[in-house]
């Protein structure tokens, strides 16, 4: 195999890889945007999640034995 043929094969593989990247680039961009949107929504929902967790927390039982007298 002469050097010209090897260079043509390498150039063909590089062109194919670049073509596949361009073909799937809208999907990659969509995945990145969805991840960013999910992160932003999670940051916006964080205060409400903390509030709900505080409201749903069960009260702690008394630490001393005075509850036995009631």
Image (spheres, rainbow, N blue to C red):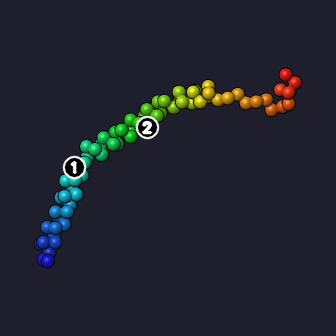
Above or below — where is 55 with respect to 33?
Answer: above
Q: Secondary structure at mark 1?
A: helix
Left or right of 40? Residue 65 is right
Assess disc 1: are there few (<14), some (14-19) or many (≥20) residues with their C-alpha within 10 Å of its C-alpha. Answer: few
Residue 23 % position (x, y):
21, 49
Reading the image, the residue beneath label 2 is 39
Tell me if label 1 and label 2 are in contact, CB under 8 Å.
Answer: no
Give the quarter of the image for residue 65: top right
Instruction: Check the image and name the residue furthest to the bottom.
Output: 1
Above or below — where is 35 with respect to 44?
Answer: below
- On residue 45, the disc is none
Residue 7 % position (x, y):
16, 69
Q: Secondary structure at mark 2?
A: helix
Residue at the location (20% across, 61% down)?
A: 14
Quadrant housing the C terminus: top right
Reading the image, the residue beneath label 1 is 22
Residue 11 % position (x, y):
17, 64
Above or below — where is 51 with respect to 28?
Answer: above
Residue at the location (47% across, 30% down)?
A: 44
Left or right of 35? Residue 60 is right
Q: Which label's residue is closer to the chain start, 1 or 2? A: 1
Give the quarter of the image for residue 64: top right
Left or right of 43? Residue 24 is left
Mark-to-mark CA distance, 1 and 2: 26 Å
Left or right of 49? Residue 6 is left
Quadrant housing the N terminus: bottom left
Give the quarter of the image for residue 50: top right
């Amino acid at each position: 195999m002469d050097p010209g043929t090897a260079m043509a094969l390498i150039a063909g593989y590089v062109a194919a890889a670049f073509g596949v990247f361009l073909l799937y680039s809208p999907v990659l961009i969509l995945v990145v945007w969805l991840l960013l949107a999910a992160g932003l929504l999670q940051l916006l929902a964080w205060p409400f999640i903390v509030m709900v967790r505080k409201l749903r927390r069960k009260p702690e039982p008394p630490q001393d034995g005075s509850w036995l007298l009631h």
